[in-house]
Image (cartoon, rainbow, N blue to C red):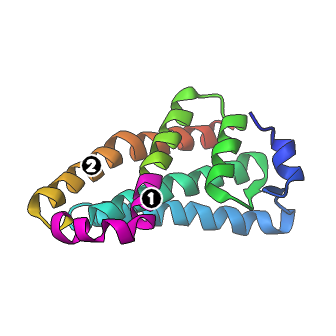
């Protein structure tokens, strides 16, 4: 496991300056809520976007925790560095598992995008079907209920405990 000090030395994590702290915290207090609301709002019509927004809600509340409780902000390789910070600073295995699960689902969608050229024909003919739409709706609802919401609750409790 990479230590926080190493991530700081590599410039991937920075200590937040006192003058910047309240603005930084305020931003993430709002952005995780915005992403959560967007995730809920599009869950039926645009379920893949719901998953992406749900993951970003998790990601942003994690950055809020890192800022508020540890005075840290993620600077480089944001997603991977955030996971390393969670591994290093958070003791709960359940929180780590939920965050990794969210990241894996997000990455699978990102990989779909990266493979877009190869997958274009498949997407063109199959993702528009009612079967695929319903499959993504189900996946988005499960992700929201079983990963995003439990994760947010756990992180909120960590923030309030301090």
| Residue 27 lies in the magenta stretch | no
| Residue 123 lies in the magenta stretch | yes
Q: Give the residue number, with chain letter if any, for mark 1.
A: 111
Of 127 and 157, the residue lying toward us: 127
The span picked out in magenta is: 106-126
> Residue 23 in the image: x percent, y percent?
71, 69
Q: Residues within 10 Å of mark 1 (few under 14, many from 20)?
A: few
> Residue 106 in the image: x percent, y percent?
45, 54
State which quadrant residue 128 falls in. Answer: bottom left
Q: In terms of sequence position, does the residue under pointer 1 or pointer 2 come before the other?
A: 1
State which quadrant residue 10 falls in. Answer: bottom right
Decide if residue 108 is on the left or right side of residue 59.
left
> Residue 58 in the image: x percent, y percent?
51, 51
State which quadrant residue 146 falls in. Answer: top left
For label 1, the SS is helix
The answer to whether one can see residue 158 in this image is yes
Residue beneath the point at 86% across and 63% down: 17
Q: Are the residues tagged 1 and 2 within 8 Å (C-beta)?
A: no
For label 2, the SS is helix
Count of labels shown?
A: 2
Which mark's residue is nearer the viewer, 1 or 2?
1
Q: Give the residue number, with chain letter if any, for mark 2.
A: 139
The answer to whether one can see residue 153 in this image is no
Residue beneath the point at 65% across and 28% down: 91
Q: Main secondary structure of the magenta part?
A: helix
Query: For the view shown, which residue lies furthest in the right direction?
Result: 9
Of 108 and 150, the residue lying toward us: 108
Residue beneath the point at 65% across and 41% down: 86
Query: For the view shown, which residue lies furthest in the front direction?
Result: 118
Decide if residue 8 is on the left or right side of residue 142.
right
Decide if residue 149 is on the left or right side of residue 75.
left
């Amino acid at each position: 496991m990479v230590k926080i000090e190493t991530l700081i030395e590599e410039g991937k994590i920075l200590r937040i300056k006192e003058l910047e702290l309240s603005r930084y915290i305020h931003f993430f207090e709002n952005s995780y809520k915005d992403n959560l609301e967007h995730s809920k709002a599009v869950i039926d019509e645009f379920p893949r976007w719901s998953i992406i927004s749900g993951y970003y809600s998790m990601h942003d509340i994690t950055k809020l925790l890192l800022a508020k409780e540890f005075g840290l902000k993620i600077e480089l390789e944001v997603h991977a560095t955030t996971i390393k910070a969670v591994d290093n600073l958070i003791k709960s295995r359940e929180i780590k598992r939920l965050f990794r699960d969210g990241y894996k689902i997000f990455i699978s969608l990102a990989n779909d995008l990266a493979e877009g050229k190869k997958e274009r024909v498949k997407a063109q003919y199959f993702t528009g079907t009612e079967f695929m739409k319903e499959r993504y709706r189900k996946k988005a609802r499960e992700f929201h209920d079983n990963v995003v919401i439990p994760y947010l609750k756990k992180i909120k409790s960590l923030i309030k405990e301090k």
